[in-house]
Structure formats: C-alpha cells, structure tokens
Amino acid sequence: MEKLKNKKILITGHTGFKGSWLSYTLFKIGAKIYGISLKPSKKINRNFFLLGLESKCINYFQDINNLKELNKTINQIRPEIIFHFAAQPLISESFEDPIKTFQTNVFGTQNLMECCRKNKFIKVIIISTTDKVYENNKIRNFKEEDKLNGDDPYSASKAATEILINSYSKSFLSDKKVATVRAGNVIGFGDYSKNRIIPDLIENIFSKKALFIRQLESYRPWHNILDVTLSYLKLCIYLNQKNINYSNWNFSPKFKKKFTVEEIIIKLSKISKKKIYYKQANTKKIFKEKKFLSLNSNKSIKTLKLKNQNIDQTLNQIYKLNDLYRNNKDVISLIDKLIERHVINEI
C-alpha cells in the first residue's frame, strides 16, 4: 500500500464502472487522484457520485479526442502513473455508432500516447483494452501472444488500439513502462451500462422489468470488479519495480468450470430468492456475438500472485450491495470492508 501512497495518479474514464472503483480504492490507499472524463451522468455514472469522487478526485471533465486540451491538462497534473480507461465500451453501441467507437478507442488513445511521449514525468502507463481483442474462430483459452482480430466494431477498435500501443511503446516510449490489460465481462455493484447482463438482471430483480437475453448459452469469464482492481494495482507496483518497457496481460478468474449466461441467471435467482423472468431475444435483429470467450491468465496469476473470489461470492456481493443501495441503507460501509479485505490487504 505504501508503494502507491501519495503518488500522483491520473485515471482517464474515472467516472465509469471500473474507473470509479479504482479511483475510490486508490483514494483509500492515500494516492493523489486526478481524473479525466466526459461530464458524468447521474444515471450512468451513479457509482462515481455514490462514492463521493467529485470531492475525492481532482476532476477534469473533457474529451480525450481533443489533443490540445488533453495535453494541457496532463502538463498541469504532471502524473507519474496513468491508468487509461476512457473508451466507448459497449459492443451494442459500436454497431449503432462505429465512427465514435473507433474515434474514441483508437484515436483517443493515440492522443494520450502523444501526450505521454512528450513528457518525462510519466513513468507507468496501463491501458485497458478487452478480452475480445483475439481472433476468436475456435474454442480455446486465449494467451497474450495469440493473434489479434475483431469481427465487431468494438473488438476491432480495441485490437487496433493494441497495435497502436505496441508501435508507440517501441518507437517513442522506451523510457516508460507501458502495459495493456485485457479483462472482460467484469461484474460488480455500480455498473449501470445498458445492454449488460448483470445490470439488467438486477433491474429485473428489483423492478421486474422485462428481460430479453441475447445468448443464454454464451460462456464468459465473469470477473469480480474487486479482483480486477487488485490486478491493476498489483501490476502497477510490479511494473514500477521491473525494467519492462512493454507488456500485455490477461486478467481472468480461474474457475474449475465455466458458466453460461443462463447459469448465472439461475444462481442470482437463488441468491436473491426471487424469480427472474427472462426470454430469449430475437437474435435475427441482434448483432452477432461470440458464444465462447475465455482467457488463459496463467502469466498474471503466477507473476503477480493473483487469486480470485468464486462466482457465488461475487454474485452474493453484487446482490447484497444492490439490496442495501435500493433500500436506502448504508452501502458505503460494506464497500469499504470489501475493498479492505479483498484489495488493500492483498497489496
């Protein structure tokens, strides 16, 4: 914990799901947190406001697509460490607006890389991409060195981002520690994105809103947000200690079995003791998604000594936190305990 205390850390996309959890955890550790994001929405970015991050971070509400403003802000902050989360993160939205998706995910990241290569005070840069960057044409657990590709606009934009970062790291950023982190289907309290299975299930449980599932038999990693946050922080500390210029890391839980969307629904129904009513969506009108997605995370687990909570622990946490929140009870105390137990005590 002391290794990050008082460090000047910039988080882009800090108002989002992963960004808000990382920002709050780093605040609890004692780091100096700066955030660059679009102006937050009270609906989509509720976690940012619930955690009180408007006063716990120094906030800059601006667009990473504006290179001039981004460079000005980074020069003003002078961070030592950058976590880059700012992105268009939804597959469904990438079909609706592919231009925005590529603009933000690829060229927004390039703007950040341009700012980083001009500033010596930046030492560590960790860029979040996705588990969907791999060429997914057969069932396997993808390793970091596997071929990149992307059939849908979101996946393609993130695979392109990986290539961009590789180029910048090797061409311009030899004095910095640069890493891409590939995690996906991160689940937990505070995710209010549309067309996401866990937020939709929670909404169904508490409001009985109609639920249509795109692919009931799809397998996904189902990674606890606390475990992901710990992974990012452990990697940051590791990079700060090692002479590694550029690296890629898969972050995925290691379960004895893989779980389908339908199995997650059944588990959450049992945990909540409430019937979840759902139907298969008309897939003819829905964009195509890969049925099977799994990562080989042996490198990160072994190197960073990572461990993960099981799926029942994760779903229990999600339900309990949402139950407290929706009944106007003290949810922050439980969040603090979970962060202390599963993240801070493990650093």
Image (spheres, rainbow, N blue to C red):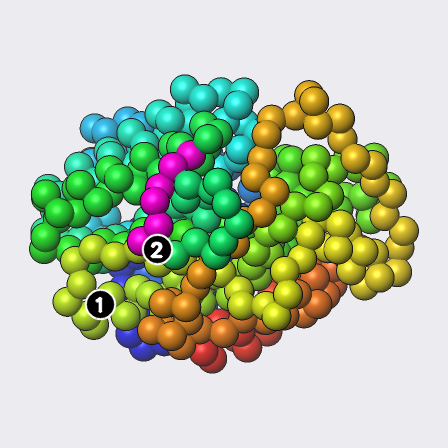
Q: Which residues are magenta?
A: 145-150
Crowding at dot 2, Cα within 10 Å, few <14 / some 14-19 / many 20+, comes out as some
The residue lying at 39 percent from left, 56 percent from top is 143
The quadrant holding residue 4 is bottom left
Report x, y in % for residue 326: 76, 52
Q: Which residue is mark 1?
A: 240
Q: Nearer the viewer, residue 294 or 76?
A: 294
Q: Quadrant of the C terminus?
A: bottom left
Mark-to-mark CA distance, 1 and 2? 21 Å
Q: Nearer the viewer, residue 284 or 71?
A: 284
Q: Is residue 76 left or right of residue 193?
A: left
The quadrant holding residue 101 is top left
Q: In the figure, 181 relative to 159: above or below?
A: below
Crowding at dot 1, Cα within 10 Å, few <14 / some 14-19 / many 20+, comes out as some
The residue lying at 37 percent from left, 26 percent from top is 102
Q: Is residue 213 left or right of residue 195?
A: right
Can residue 22 be seen here? The reply is no
What label does residue 144 carry, if any? 2
The residue lying at 70 percent from left, 22 percent from top is 284
Report x, y in % for residue 344: 46, 74
| Main secondary structure type of the part rendered in magenta | loop
Mark 1 vs mark 2: which is more N-terminal?
2
Could you tell me the amino acid type at mark 2?
A: Glu
Q: Quadrant of the N terminus?
A: bottom left
Report x, y in % for residue 139: 53, 49
The quadrant holding residue 231 is bottom left
Q: Which label lies toward us, 1 or 2?
A: 2
State the SS at label 2. Answer: loop
Q: Is residue 146 magenta?
A: yes
